[in-house]
Amino acid sequence: MSHSADLNPVTHPWLQKDNFVRQFIEQAWDLFCIFDVHGNLTYASKSFNPVIGLIPEDFQQIVDFIDSEYRMDIHKMFIKTLQTSSSSKLELRMKGSSESFNWFECTAMPICNGEGNLSEICFVLNDITLRKNHESRLIAMAFHDPLTGLPNRRLFKEQLQQMFMQAKRTNRPFALLYVDIDDFKMINDTMGHDVGDAFLQDFAHRIQDCLREVDLFARMGGDEFTILLPSVDCEEHVNSVAKRILHCVDQPWEVQGHLFRATVSMGITMYNQDQTEASHMMKEVDLALYQVKGKGRNHFQFYQEK
């Protein structure tokens, strides 16, 4: 697409026909740009400058200011409009004037000449960043624990299933840990639920510091947590992680002026080809955790078949 020298809306034939349309486009916050059938930019609205920090002379093609992920989509949109003379929509993101990326709903609309033939294509871009941010928050709320910000039970189960199916295909092992805070009820009962909530938040931070970025740490509810360790093929590595967690939790806690100590118990299982479903691994760590609790807590144990 080449750049046209004449971008004055007053001299653009389509906008010159209707003064109301011209004034509406020039004062609207949406972005308007028009291309001829050869892809030459013939008009760009003044709103490009305050919204994305560009004036029409700064770009020659619509793809110049769009994130590279969507450039092929815009090109296909242009070709489709040429071939079908019909409108279409696409959600995409572009860098705004503040250097942050904004989301836009882009609509491509055909413009026909007096003979009814398609002569130009108008792109209208409406900023939908607030809506997309709201959708992202709703998704985060659906898959994350509101207190700790950790993945919740729903997201954990999805990730466990995906990791299990991948292990079935690639035979790449992983480990699952079930973590239970010992006597957490006593913290709530003696110090109050506010302290208990603050402790859980601090607990989440401490455990995350013991893990890799690729590991998944989730809150199942209450004082129960799970950990997925991908690409782990030996018990020695899992042993070191479990010992690190025990040592980390055993350090003194100071929460809202209260000083105390805490411990955890953990059940552990490793993926193996004999497991037919991801739910079997959950049963195994649950049994291993139960055995740890029966032996006095503050320790970990691998699942062992009887």
Image (tube, rainbow, N blue to C red):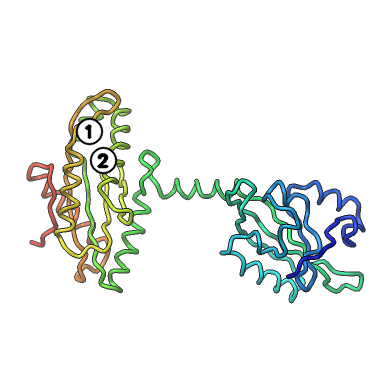
- Name the side, left or right, on which 291 lies relative to 48: left
**Quarter-of-image position of residue 71:** bottom right
- Is there a contact, CB below 8 Å, between mark 2 and mark 1? yes
Q: Residues within 10 Å of mark 2 (few under 14, many from 20)?
A: some
Against 136, residue 88 (above or below) is below
Cα separation between marks 2 and 1: 9 Å
Of the image marks 2 and 1, the number of the one nearer the N terminus: 1
Q: Amino acid at mark 2?
A: Asp
Please identify the residue farthest to the bottom as the structure is shown: 83
Question: Residue at label 1?
Answer: 185
Q: Quadrant of residue 264?
A: top left
Q: What percent of the width, then of the height, locates residue 129?
A: 60, 49
Which label sits on residue 270? Answer: none
| Label 1 CA crowd tier, 10 Å (few <14, some 14–19, many 20+) | some
- Residue at position x 16%, y 53% from top? 240
- Tell me which residue sits at (16%, 42%) in the image: 247
* Residue corresponding to mark 2: 223
Residue 16: percent from left, percent from top: 91, 57
Amino acid on which disc 1 is placed = Lys
Give the tally of numbered discs.
Answer: 2
| SS of the residue under disc 1 | helix
